[in-house]
Amino acid sequence: MISILRIAGIATGIFTVVLVCFPVRAAESPTPAAPPQSPPPAAAADDELPYVYTHWKHFTTADGLPNDHIFAIKADGPRVWVGTEDGLACYDKTTGKFRVWKEKDGLPWRAVTGIDVDKKTGDVWLALFGGGLARFSGGRFDHFHQLNSGLVNDVVYGVAVENDNVWAATTAGASRYNVKTRQWTIFTEKNAPMEEIWNYGVSYDQGKVYLAVWGSGCLEYDVAVANSGKGDPWKAYLDPDGEMEIDLYRDDGIIHVIVTGASHVEDALWISTYFGTCRYDGRHWRGFYAKETGLPSDFTNNLKARSSNECYFAHDKGLGVVADFRTDTYVAYTRDPNTLRGKARIYRSGRLLKEVDMERSVPHNFQIAVEVDGNDIWAGTGKGLGWGIGKGYYPGVKANPDWLHEKHIAVVSRQERK
Amino acid sequence: MRSFSLSCMILILFAAVVQAEPGARPSNPTAWHPPLAVDAETLKILEEVNSLNAYQVPNLPLKTDENYAHTSRDLEPFRHVTPYKRHFLEQMEYYGAGRTIPEPEDVKTVKIGFIGPIEPTVSVATGGKSHNEELLGKKMLQGCVLAIEEANAQGGYLRRNIPFELVVSNDNGLWGSSGNEIIKQAYKDNVWAILGTIDGANSHIAIRVALKAEVPMMNSGDMDPTFIETNIPWVFRCVGDDRQMNYLLADYLFRKLKMKRVGIIRASNRYGRFGVREIRDSARRLGYPIPIEMAYQLGQTDFSLHLDRIQAANVDAVVHWGNADDGARILNQMRARGMNQPFFVCDRCVSREFVEIAGKNADGVIGCYPWNPDRKDPKLDAFRERFRKRFENDEKFGKDAEVETYSAHAYDGMNMLIWAIQVAGLNRAKIRDVLAYRTQPWPGVTGDIIFSAAMDDIGEVYLAKYENGRWRYYSREDLAIPRGPQRPPGDRGELIASPQNP
């Protein structure tokens, strides 16, 4: 950490000299060229439908949760860890019971905003919203904060385990802790391409760490490149138009630089922002706006991808799904605020195909966290936790699927609505 | 990390009418009925937000704007291409479950948070050692203290007859500690709303916390345009921002004065960097790109290197964006070397400190200003008088009893929060609602405060000119400053496809 700070200090000095001695260039910003066209979606018949979750369980404080305001979910085999605004919970899927830890039980701080599990050790790492970072291991909480560690800030939004490292996305940069060497590394604007340092989320997949940075897009950190010491491990994904108030082209890059989450699976990087969502396959970007897809909203708190073809988005107006990217097919799960019944709407290329009425879907429309758990999904909301049970789940689309004939749902097609 | 609480409680518990609005009428006695007179629109908002279950959202109209921030068409980014999507044209709604959280029974005071730079500090966000920001922060605190004390003198929180309490945190920008302070206020102090702060970077950190903790946040001192460009439904700003002031200055420089080469010198911190962005962009879009922009380190006193280059660039005028003392020293060094170009400054330089350092050189300097302190308004005069009486002998505030931008806007912002709490009760979501759905301007001491769809004050901003030993304030109309073409009504100018659904 000391060496990094020293390097950062030298870098700052150089920057200062450059800034003082040379004018800031008032560069022209020509209109960016229109991006290459994304491949058109594959054709699909209207009866080819994505999987729809029609079996849901809801959990609130009445069922043993410590708090109904759900901030984070992490599936871990038979267990599901749940971070709330006031406590940590662990749901045992085999017994159907919750275990709960609050501050009086040793949890270092009440609000748990991120969770990851170290697959090698089973340690549970917790991002604490204003309380730093905690490791839950062997029934004991170890607490890391600004005053006893290299954690750059105690407001931690997200945590991710990368090999022997634990990454923390904080409001003043990212911190990395090596559990073997116990060394901390801090990443800020001084040693990473962070135009702003307000980290919001972090995830790890296939040798790369993805930081979702409010005001600085998505930053990709290549672990192998960093370890080799050759080349720049960082790659920044930004909105090419550089403007806050517009999105010049939908498919030219990230929808907006205020990024809330990044989830990389297979060969696709999915990104959520407060202005819409998008996907990058390494060659093409594709943006998703609610108005043209049927997704519940553009304001997206978080996301989780299941594959390069399927991703779940925690919107403020419901749970949105790019259910089959290939055919441009979407599902929007909501709860009717008046009847409290569940709804799933299926769209293709902005066209409503079917509306599914069911006893329940998501517990509340204000979605904050989402997790993919094998064939199941979990939805963390402003009022309760939802478990979508993926009985008969299938990827992509299928003609005349089994769920369509379940007796407890009512399906209305677009034509019938008319 | 350091914080302290300042109790501003004057327990005069007699019934009183609190800041009733013009045209207000008493409402029906119901459980949610506010203990003060409110207008019909507010009553309708209250009726709606109090009728909801935890899953419903108010069926109330959201604010919409034709174009963002009154930007004229020729100043829109990439104006020759229709963008796919325009943001900030429709007000953000809060869709959470917070409206049904019941008012707690065990409160002894109604806490409102304050976060601002009130102690010298070392700050990464502000560019190193803090540089007089605490002077601005203390003025902001004065405005808040007076608003709280006045509310308490009129009965405090009228539903319970308990006092308001100001919970004060220093905005120490080091390592993003403003986020920790907001967490403390939201979860430990249990404040009902927060006012702050000044530094753009720290404000961004604070509003991210406010969004997740679901607490209303009023800003009265951060002019960073990007502060509001975040789509957070919990954030309000009751002061005109640098975008508005940049547009006015750009129109004056390029459309009115027909200048062609304007140089910029600014602080190399977020305030300077974002403060001039719309001047730079406007200049380029109008066909007169800024030939030179120099950034200086906070705390330096010799600007000869920067001025050498600006002088060599042969500019018609110089714009400065930074603190008052820096601006005054730059001006003095310009004049000393024979650079007699007109000097334009940001609102921080429209101050006594600037004039004291600049001396005679201050004559003719023109600055941007978010309000008109010369406005003839009995409300403003009375506020000045009360402010003078309250602080002229207060050692803690250095007996500084002058009303300026930061104190006046903080007073307005705090009064908006107090009003919202009185009207909505102790529920953060409903406190947000009565401010967010309000369509009438807030009649503040700084003038009418009108929120855009982005919850930003889009009221008029001014140019201040130092002449005959004082600052005088001019509106766009006073100076006949032309305005660029506006987007026609109904033309959102975006390409996004319409849904094809029933």
Image: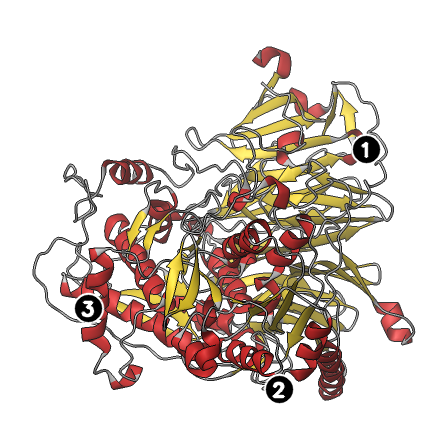
Mark 3 belongs to which amino acid?
Glu
Q: Which of marks 1 and 2 is in front?
A: 2
Give the mark count: 3
Mark 1 belongs to which amino acid?
Arg
* Residue wearing tag 2: B302
Give the secondary structure at mark 1: helix
User: B475 or B256: nearer the eye?
Assistant: B256
- Pinpoint residue B281: horizontal percent, then vertical percent: 65, 54
Up-down relation of residue B296 to residue B347 (above or below): below
Residue A102 seen anywhere in this rendered image of the structure: no
Mark 2 belongs to which amino acid?
Asp
Sequence order check, earlier mark of 2 and 3: 2
Up-down relation of residue B405 to residue A64 (above or below): below
- Pinpoint residue B233: horizontal percent, then vertical percent: 47, 49
Q: Quadrant of the N terminus of chain A?
A: bottom right
* Residue wearing tag 1: A326
Mark 2: give few (<14), some (14-19) or many (20+) Cα within 10 Å.
Answer: few
Chain to which the residue tagged by mark 1 belongs = A
* Residue wearing tag 3: B385
**C-alpha distance separating marks 1 and 2:** 61 Å
- Numbered tag placed on residue B74 in the rendering: none
Q: Which of marks 2 and 3 is in front?
A: 2
Determine whether, in the image, residue B63 is placed left or right of residue B79: left
- Pinpoint residue A96: horizontal percent, then vertical percent: 55, 50
Mark 3: give few (<14), some (14-19) or many (20+) Cα within 10 Å.
Answer: some
